[in-house]
Every structure is written in structure tokens, then in C-alpha cells.
Image (cartoon, rainbow, N blue to C red):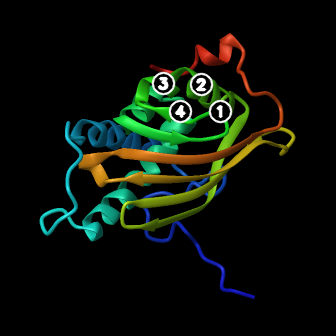
Amino acid sequence: MGRRTNYYQDLAADYSKPGLVSEEMKQQLIAMGEQFVAMKQDVLPQVDATYTLEQIERENKEWWPTHCEALRQSRGDILTGEYRNELVYFCQDGPYYGVEEQKTREQHWWALIAQPGVTMCWPIVMFHGEFVHFEWKCEDNETNETIAKGMVCWVRRGHRGGCHFKSEQLTFYRDVFAPQNLVDLVTL
């Protein structure tokens, strides 16, 4: 059997299961997420000697917990800000080209996975240069049932570039469109 890995050992916070992140850390991560969105440049930066894949990977590791906390808090403003305007997004409802094209659909997904009484977790996250691969699941806090799960690959060019490509497989077990009262909880 292969060795088991703690994917969060070198990250600021552990989002592999519920209850591992302090309230203070949650607030810090939201503030950092807002800062990272503000750092995104208008033009996708080149990977070169002044902006290396090693630096991009370090920035992606720094960013990852902020992304998780933004999802748990329904911060659609941060989540949308993580994408480049020219985002390419492949999923079962897609493809989507550009950040505006997918916004309405993704708002429903965010509302379902961050609804009250449900906790989203990311048991696996791996980094390689600008690639971030992760698996996620949403658990009902009362029944422990999995209400949704997925596997995702982001191509994120660090803080300066943001996400320019996303590929995702999602499975929803309860519903695929959120009721309006849940959609209203997503901050845009």
C-alpha cells in the first residue's frame, strides 16, 4: 500500500474535514483572499525568470486556504474575483468561456455547497507549478450524508494571474438548482 499523505502539512489551515480552522484564522484567510484578488493583473503574466513556476506554486499554496474559506462563507465576490475575465471552464454543463458566462450557474452550485447545515471539505489537494488539483465533498452536519462531491483542476498563475482554466466534475445528490433563499445567501 502506498504512503498516506497529509495534504495540508505545509499550508496555513487544514480544510480536509470540518472543525479544524479557528474563527481567528477564518477571518485572516478572508482578508488574505480579498488581498489576493486585488493583486491580479489585467494581463496574464508570463512565466519567466522573474515569475517562476516555483514562485507561482508557493503563491498557490498560500492562496488555497483562502479559497476554501471563501467557499465555506459563501463569498462569491472573492470566488469570482479569483478567475480571469478570459476564464475557460470545462464541466458537465459547459464549456463556459469568460467569467460572466458561468456566473449564474456557479452561483447555484455555491449556494448548494455552502448552505447552512452543510460543510464543504477538501480531503485532497495537490500542487504542481500553476496546477492545483483537488477533490471536495459536502457533508450534511446532522446526518453526515454526502450531498455533493467533485474533482477539480485549476490552472492558476499565482496571485498576479489568477485562474485562467478550470476543469471540474461535480456530482450533486440532492439537487442541482438551489432555492432562491439559498442563492440569496451568496455575496456578489
Q: If the image is split into quadrants, where does the C terminus sit?
A: top left
Tell me, for residue 93, which label it has, or none: 1
Q: Which residue is mark 4?
A: 73
Q: Nearer the viewer, residue 177 or 9?
A: 177
Tell me, for residue 186, which label it has, or none: none
Instruction: From the image, state whether disc 2 or disc 3 is nearer to you.
Output: 3
Instruction: From the image, state whether disc 4 or disc 3 is nearer to you.
Output: 3
Give me the residue at 67% from left, 12% from top.
181
> Real-space Cα distance between discs 4 and 1?
24 Å
Give me the residue at 53% from left, 51% from top.
21
Establish if 120 lies above or below 6: above
Q: Secondary structure at mark 4?
A: loop
Image spot of residue 158 (x, y percent): 30, 54
85 with respect to 97 (left or right): left
Instruction: From the image, state whether disc 2 or disc 4 is nearer to you.
Output: 2
Q: Earlier in the sequence, mark 2 or mark 4?
A: 4
Residue type beneath disc 3:
Glu
> Real-space Cα distance between discs 2 and 3?
8 Å
145 with respect to 108 (left or right): right
Q: Are marks 1 and 2 in contact (CB under 8 Å)?
A: yes
> Real-space Cα distance between discs 1 and 2?
9 Å
Number of marks in the image? 4
Q: Which residue is mark 3?
A: 101
Q: Earlier in the sequence, mark 1 or mark 2?
A: 1
> Real-space Cα distance between discs 3 and 1?
11 Å
Tell me, for residue 105, which label it has, or none: 2
Residue type beneath disc 4:
Gln
Q: If the image is split into quadrants, where does the N terminus sit?
A: bottom right
Image spot of residue 172 (x, y percent): 77, 37
Q: Are marks 4 and 1 in contact (CB under 8 Å)?
A: no
Q: Earlier in the sequence, mark 4 or mark 3?
A: 4
